[in-house]
Structure formats: C-alpha cells, structure tokens
C-alpha cells in the first residue's frame, strides 16, 4: 500500500473525524496512479493515521475509510458499514407513511463518495468518483446479503464537478421498475423515476421543509414557489390548505412533471399556476403587476446559467432575496434554501441580514433547518451539512 504523508496543519481535523483527503493535505499525492487503489496516511514521524482510497472529487483526492491500522478494507468492511447504516434507518423502514429516504450518506456513514437512497423497494446508488465506483461489486454484494429489494439503480456522478454521466440505462439488477413509481412522504405522494437522467423527481433532503410548509405555514396562503422543478413544495402547500400556488421553473420538463405531482395527490392542476420561465423575469413581472405573496420559496441551484445571466448562490443570494422581499406580504414568510456547501449557516444568515437591511425592513428567522436525520453527517464539519433552510418572517 502506498503511503501519503499528511501536512501537520491537517492532522487535527482528521483526528476529529474529517475523512476527506484534500488535495493540499498530501504533497506526495502524485504517487497515486489508479483510482480505487488504497493508501495509508502517516504523520511526519511515520505514525499511522488512517487508510483510505484514491478517488478524485471536486474537493479532494479520496477518503479515509478507517483509522484502525489492522482493519482490512474488504467485503466484510463494506458489508458492516452498510449494515450499520441500515440498522440506523430501521424506524424509516418501519414507517409506512414515508417510503423514500437515504439509507447511506457518504462520509456520514463511513464511506465518502457513496450514497444510497431507498424508494419503496428500489435502491439507488450514487457513485461520486471513479475510485468509489471500483468498489461497485462490494457494495452490490453487501446489499444482496443484507436486504431484499425489487431492483437496484445507479447514478454515476463523477465528472470532475460531481455531475451526472449520461448513460443509456441506470438499471443494475433485479426486476426493472415501471416508472414513475409513487412513493410516500409523510402521507404525501410523489412520482419518482429512477431511470431518467440525473434527477429522480424529488429531493429527499427537503422532506422536513415540505412537512413544515404543509403543517405550519401553508394554510390560506398565496404561495410562490421559485426554482420549483417538479413542484414538490407546491404540492405540500396545497395539501396544507394554500389558497393558491404558483410554481416557476425555466426547464420545459417542469410543466408535465409538476402536473404529474399534483395529479398523484388528487389535486386539480388547472386550479394552480405553473409557469415555465426565468425566475428573474417572473420577479419583474410580479413587481410590475404589484403582486404580493404570503409565502415565497427560494430554492435555487448553487450555479445556474440562463440565456441572460448566471446565478451563483454564494455571490447572488442577497440579490435574490431583495427581489423576493419586494413581492412578499407584510408578515409573510420567505423560505430561503441553499445546498451550496462552500458556505455555512452563519454566512447564509449574513446574506439574509444584508438583504433586509438594504431594503430597510425588519425580519425574524422563525425556523432554521439543516439536513434531515437520515442524511447522517458529522456536525463538527458544516461543509458536509450542506443544506441550509431559513423561514424568514417579513416584519415592517
Ligand atoms: N425546489 C425544487 C428543486 C430545485 S432544483 C424541489 O424542491 O424539488 C433547481 C431548479 O432550478 C431546476 O429545476 C432548474 O431548472 C431551475 N432553474 C435554474 N435556473 C433557473 C432560472 N433562472 N429560472 C427558473 N428556474 C431555474
């Protein structure tokens, strides 16, 4: 096994459980040749620190898998990790109101670069590097041994930016599904397709936000859902008693997909507004018409490029909020969400504070949420708890 020597300033984090091996931490990283090969990490005195695998991702060159010198990285290792993760989700498997959740969350469950989601009998594995993908047989063998399932699907997310690699078919084994399947989440229905490119129709990490909108914030509200994708927040709002919803997304496929999500919940989609357009154009339109909403959901991607502009949540979130504030009713709520891992909750709140100060409007953050319980992560390192959602009440 090759040995990587870690720079002293990185040692402390690793001892505290940080398992990503960043590019800068190991100066002799060039000795690594084949993704998936195992390496040992030592300190400057040649003392064993951990062992891991080589796999290039956007932030690092691999992950530490074990800090025990005598632990082998073999089939038993992978089976044990997955078994532990499954046992931690036992109450999810037992709950018939929610049939889709994350069963394995990368480094939070001990194997960085790997996630496994469960959708009512189907497993979906995401591989985040070529290196992780080299353990494919081990992971599938572990699922075979530990679970029963209808089928396994996979997503290869390993171009350098963690983007999805298009492939003909994401099916791995089992009895192929007839999609969409309908999964349940806190009693709501969602149509899911595991064999239709990068996305499945629902982002499981927003489960708690959907529930909160439905249970606490939607009643009688006029709701604007921006960057709405398949309209999952709009569905939650209607089921929570919203007066009206408007879903806005640039992607053409968002229209049929949103109609589908309403329909599988027995909601008349014709009574709701679905707009295929640029959110920033919609803001201009709404301002011109002096429209006001009681609840505005902002859930932009970390980066987006449209014909007219590029949006980066790290740079432009304050501007996005400024637009939203203008069309939110007094005492209305803005749900501001971001999944950008490059900044934490504290910084996110400074974006919020600046937007309201600039507008000279008082506000109160009435809820803040991170990842739900099934998305295990090490709370000491906020970058792994990438999701940040604030419910902001617009005061006067
Ligand atoms: N809120 C959604 C997920 C949003 S994913 C949910 O909870 O399910 C991000 C979405 O933003 C994508 O569907 C993409 O098409 C859309 N998008 C990106 N840039 C946009 C823009 N400028 N205007 C409108 N939609 C945009």
Image (cartoon, rainbow, N blue to C red):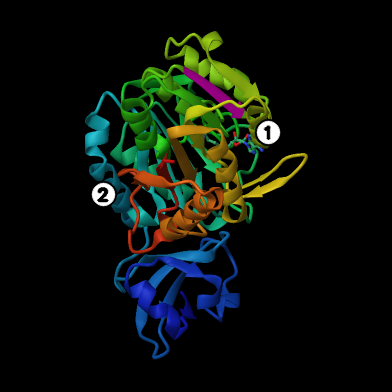
Is 346 included in the stretch rendered in magenta?
no
Quadrant for the C terminus in the image: top left
Residue 216 is labelled as none
Asked if ligand 1 lies within 8 A of label 2, the reply is no
Q: In the picture shown, does residue 343 fall above or below 339?
A: below
Residue 165: give x, y in percent of width and height: 63, 43
Q: In the picture shown, does residue 188 fall above or below 171?
A: above
Q: Nearer the viewer, residue 176 or 318?
A: 318
Residue 84 is labelled as 2
For label 1, the residue is 284
Q: Quadrant of residue 309 in the image? A: top right
Total of numbered circles in the picture?
2
Please provide the residue range marked out in magenta.
Answer: 244-248
Cα separation, mark 2 vs mark 1, equals: 50 Å
Q: Earlier in the sequence, mark 2 or mark 1?
A: 2
Q: Main secondary structure of the magenta part?
A: strand
Q: Is residue 94 toward the left or the right of residue 226 in the image?
A: left
* Image point (51%, 61%), residue name: 36
Residue 124: give x, y in percent of width and height: 45, 36
Is 245 included in the stretch rendered in magenta?
yes
* Image point (41%, 24%), residue name: 236
* Image point (52%, 52%), residue name: 340
For ligand 1, the image quadrant comes to: top right
* Image point (43%, 47%), residue name: 362
Residue 71: give x, y in percent of width and height: 30, 67
Residue 250 appears in the rendering: no
Q: Nearer the viewer, residue 211 or 89?
A: 211
Mark 2 or mark 1: which is in front?
1
Task: Find numbered disc 1 in the image and state the secondary structure of the residue it sits on.
Answer: helix
């Amino acid at each position: 096994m090759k040995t990587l020597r870690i720079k002293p300033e990185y040692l402390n984090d690793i001892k505290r459980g940080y398992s990503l091996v960043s590019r800068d931490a190991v100066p002799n990283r060039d000795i690594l040749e084949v993704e998936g090969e195992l390496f040992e990490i030592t300190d400057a005195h040649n003392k064993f620190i951990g062992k891991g695998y080589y796999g290039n991702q956007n932030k690092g060159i691999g992950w530490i898998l074990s800090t025990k010198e005598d632990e082998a990285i073999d089939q038993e290792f992978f089976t044990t990790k997955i078994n532990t993760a499954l046992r931690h989700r036992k109450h999810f498997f037992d709950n018939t109101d929610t049939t889709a959740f994350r069963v394995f969350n990368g480094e939070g469950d001990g194997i960085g670069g790997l996630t496994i989601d469960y959708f009512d009998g189907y497993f979906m594995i995401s591989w985040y590097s070529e290196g992780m993908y080299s353990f494919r047989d081990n992971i599938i063998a572990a699922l075979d041994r530990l679970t029963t399932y209808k089928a396994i699907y996979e997503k290869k997310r390993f171009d350098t930016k963690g983007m999805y690699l298009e492939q003909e078919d994401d099916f791995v084994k089992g009895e192929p599904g007839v999609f969409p399947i309908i999964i349940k989440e806190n009693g709501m229905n969602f149509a899911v397709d595991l064999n239709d490119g990068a996305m499945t129709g629902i982002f499981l990490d927003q489960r708690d936000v959907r529930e909160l909108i439905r249970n606490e914030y939607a009643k009688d509200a006029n709701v604007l859902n921006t960057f709405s994708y398949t309209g999952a927040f709009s569905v939650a709002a209607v089921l929570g008693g919203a007066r009206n919803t408007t879903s806005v997304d640039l992607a053409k496929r968002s229209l049929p997909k949103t109609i589908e999500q309403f329909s599988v919940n027995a909601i008349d989609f014709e009574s709701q507004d679905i707009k295929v357009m640029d959110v920033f154009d919609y803001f201009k339109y709404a301002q011109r018409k002096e429209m006001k909403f009681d609840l505005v959901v902002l859930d932009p991607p970390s980066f987006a490029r449209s014909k007219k502009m590029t949006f980066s949540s790290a740079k432009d979130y304050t501007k996005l909020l400024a637009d939203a504030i203008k069309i939110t009713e007094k005492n209305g709520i803005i749900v501001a969400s971001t999944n950008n891992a490059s900044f934490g909750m504290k910084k996110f709140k400074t974006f919020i504070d600046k937007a309201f100060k600039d507008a000279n409007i008082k506000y109160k953050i009435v809820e803040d949420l991170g990842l739900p319980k099934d998305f295990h992560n090490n709370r000491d390192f906020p970058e792994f708890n990438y999701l940040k959602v604030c419910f902001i009440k617009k005061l006067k």
